[in-house]
Image (cartoon, rainbow, N blue to C red):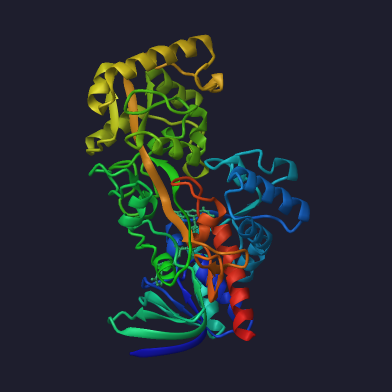
């Protein structure tokens, strides 16, 4: 058996693990990072585009804290939210310190905090709590992957060790203290890690069917071909199976909220890329952002569609439907509107003021065998092809068209400017699922990122941060919320600081 002695062992080399490593090394601790995959980067291999920091001004930090806590009904852990927000102002300087310039910066005025969609579009207003820093991509993405590469270089330069293809499988606890971990190296040999402290930064569980099933979700493939209802097209093959969570629960750590980061998603060939699903092949992705008529399988509306530019609200509502999928339906007049006048919403990553050639795009995608994209001459035919209840759909369309004619929505009070009737064939529909970037949460911590046991005592020498703890900042929604780089960086700094102080005691 191979033995490695270190001060601090870190599980995972994503943003949280590596920022913890750089921080702890900077404090003079000896650090060894263990990574399951053959390379560093975790979630960021799939293109995080920007990060957020709450500026170091008490009024901003207080307002950001209150907005976030109100948004979660104080279901989030207030100490964890506070320490995340208070530490986030160090992120831009930390990234610049790695020799990386931002592609752009967008400062949010105080009065706009909580008043607009977070990240500009796609996220709840409560996410608009700080300043945005756009990461410089290489090619068409991977801005944060570059940061991880630089952090890995920094870890080596500071004398830290990086052990790739060496997953940590369990934690060693003696009395009330964690004193190390057991890992497997790439040849299958057991590695005993003797450490004074362990930091778990092993991300989420988007590749773990059992944990997803606990949230009532069935993991499916990128075509949703097997009746499954949750798909991670943006982060296929993440290999994230909740290893850190399971290792901590096994030694008595408490469970925190767990969730899927919600992102409404029409899957299947022709819409998402084959390898990097993130990179869409056409503009049909943007159609899912639109606030036109949305119905469930019973043919009923289920949300004020103007929420379609808030992915978390949309995916929560979709998840609340019996089948856990829904449809956006529109007609030829709306096609002309999107082609000439333009769309109502677009997500900044999928920019599209107007969407040209919608019918040819539908035809192409249908010809590629996509089973979730529909174009028909009549609504009856649409009901038949989609399986939507015909009576329900026809009744809803009749009622909804009446609202459009009167310019008012007595059902869900949708802004009248988004009321567009569904009347003129051809008719178009996309079937939209509970998709996401990733799943997150599961580990209960306090504001110092110390891991908490079932009796709410601190497990000494054990720290955790990043996506694996992100449930702590939302409470316990089955979908919605999002694991974000700002949290991973902040908690990387906190765990690195705290663990270094602990081992130096
Ligand atoms: C497609 C996509 C786009 C995103 N875009 C943005 C964005 O624009 N802005 C933003 O703020 N956030 C974005 N996010 C979220 C952000 O990327 C994540 O919140 C963040 O990268 C998580 O970092 P982490 O270090 O906590 O976890 P991860 O990045 O998941 O890292 C965990 C690491 O632990 C490793 N690991 C797992 N098990 C073990 C084990 N047993 N032993 C050792 N290592 C293990 C994993 O392989 C992985 O490398 C995006 C996420 C995705 C997936």
**As drawn, is 143 to the left or to the right of 320?**
right
Find the residue positioned furthest to the front: 455
Question: Where in the figure is residue 192, as x and y percent of width and height?
Answer: 39, 85
**As drawn, is 236 to the left or to the right of 420?**
left
Number of labelled discs? Answer: 0
Residue at position x 43%, y 31% in the image: 355
Question: Where in the figure is residue 118, as x and y percent of width and height?
Answer: 59, 44
Question: Where 280 sits versus 197, above or below?
Answer: above
Question: Where in the figure is residue 198, as x and y percent of width and height?
Answer: 50, 77
Q: Is residue 99 visible?
A: no
Q: Is residue 192 visible?
A: yes
Give residue 300's quadrant in the image.
top left
Residue at position x 25%, y 41% in the image: 227
State which quarter of the image contains the N terminus: bottom left
Question: Where in the figure is residue 137, as x and y percent of width and height?
Answer: 50, 58
Question: Where 290 sits versus 263, above or below?
Answer: above
State which quarter of the image contains the C terminus: bottom right
Residue at position x 40%, y 90% in the image: 3
Question: Where 111 sits versus 330, above or below?
Answer: below
Give residue 97's quadrant in the image.
bottom right
């Amino acid at each position: 058996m191979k033995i490695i002695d270190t001060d601090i062992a870190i599980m995972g080399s994503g943003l949280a693990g590596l920022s913890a490593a750089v921080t702890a090394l900077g404090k003079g601790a000896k650090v060894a990072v263990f990574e399951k995959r053959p390379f560093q980067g975790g979630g960021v291999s799939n293109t995080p585009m920007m990060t957020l920091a709450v500026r170091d001004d008490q009024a901003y930090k207080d307002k950001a804290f209150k907005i976030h806590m109100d948004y979660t009904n104080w279901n989030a852990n207030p100490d964890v939210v506070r320490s995340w927000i208070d530490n986030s102002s160090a992120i831009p300087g930390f990234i610049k310190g790695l020799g990386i310039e931002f592609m752009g910066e967008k400062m949010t005025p105080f009065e706009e905090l909580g008043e607009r969609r977070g990240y500009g579009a796609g996220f709840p207003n409560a996410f608009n709590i700080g300043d945005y820093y756009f990461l410089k991509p290489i090619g068409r993405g991977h801005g944060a992957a570059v940061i991880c590469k630089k952090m890995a270089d920094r870890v080596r330069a500071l004398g830290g060790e990086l052990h790739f293809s060496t997953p940590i499988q369990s934690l060693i606890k003696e009395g009330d203290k964690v004193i190390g971990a057991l890992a497997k190296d790439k040849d299958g040999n057991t590695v005993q890690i003797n450490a004074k402290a362990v930091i778990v930064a092993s991300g989420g569980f988007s590749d773990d069917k059992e944990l997803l099933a606990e949230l009532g979700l069935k993991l499916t493939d990128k075509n949703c071909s097997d009746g499954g209802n949750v798909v991670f097209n943006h982060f296929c093959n993440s290999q994230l199976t909740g290893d850190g969570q399971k290792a901590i629960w096994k030694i008595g750590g408490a469970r925190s909220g767990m969730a899927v980061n919600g992102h409404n998603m029409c899957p299947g060939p022709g819409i998402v890329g084959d390898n990097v699903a993130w990179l869409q092949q056409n503009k049909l992705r943007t159609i899912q952002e639109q606030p036109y008529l949305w119905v469930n399988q019973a043919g009923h509306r289920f949300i004020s569609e103007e929420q379609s530019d808030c992915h978390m609200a949309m995916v929560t509502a979709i998840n609340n439907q019996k089948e856990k999928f829904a449809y956006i339906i529109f007609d030829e007049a709306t096609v002309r509107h999107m082609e000439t006048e333009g769309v109502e919403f677009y997500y900044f990553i999928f920019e599209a003021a107007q969407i040209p050639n919608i019918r040819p795009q539908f035809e192409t995608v249908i010809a590629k065998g996509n089973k979730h994209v529909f174009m028909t001459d009549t609504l009856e035919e649409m009901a038949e092809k989609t399986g939507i209840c015909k009576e329900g759909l026809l009744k809803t369309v009749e009622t909804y068209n009446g609202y459009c004619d009167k310019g008012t929505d007595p059902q869900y009070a949708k802004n009248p400017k988004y009321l567009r009737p569904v009347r003129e064939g051809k008719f178009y529909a996309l079937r939209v699922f509970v998709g996401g970037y990733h799943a997150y949460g599961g580990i209960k911590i306090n504001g110092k990122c110390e891991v908490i046991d079932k009796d709410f005592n601190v497990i000494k020498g054990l720290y955790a941060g990043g996506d694996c703890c992100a449930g702590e900042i939302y409470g316990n929604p089955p979908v919605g919320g999002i694991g974000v780089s700002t949290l991973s960086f902040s908690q990387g700094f906190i765990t690195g600081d705290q663990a270094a102080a602990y081992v130096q005691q």
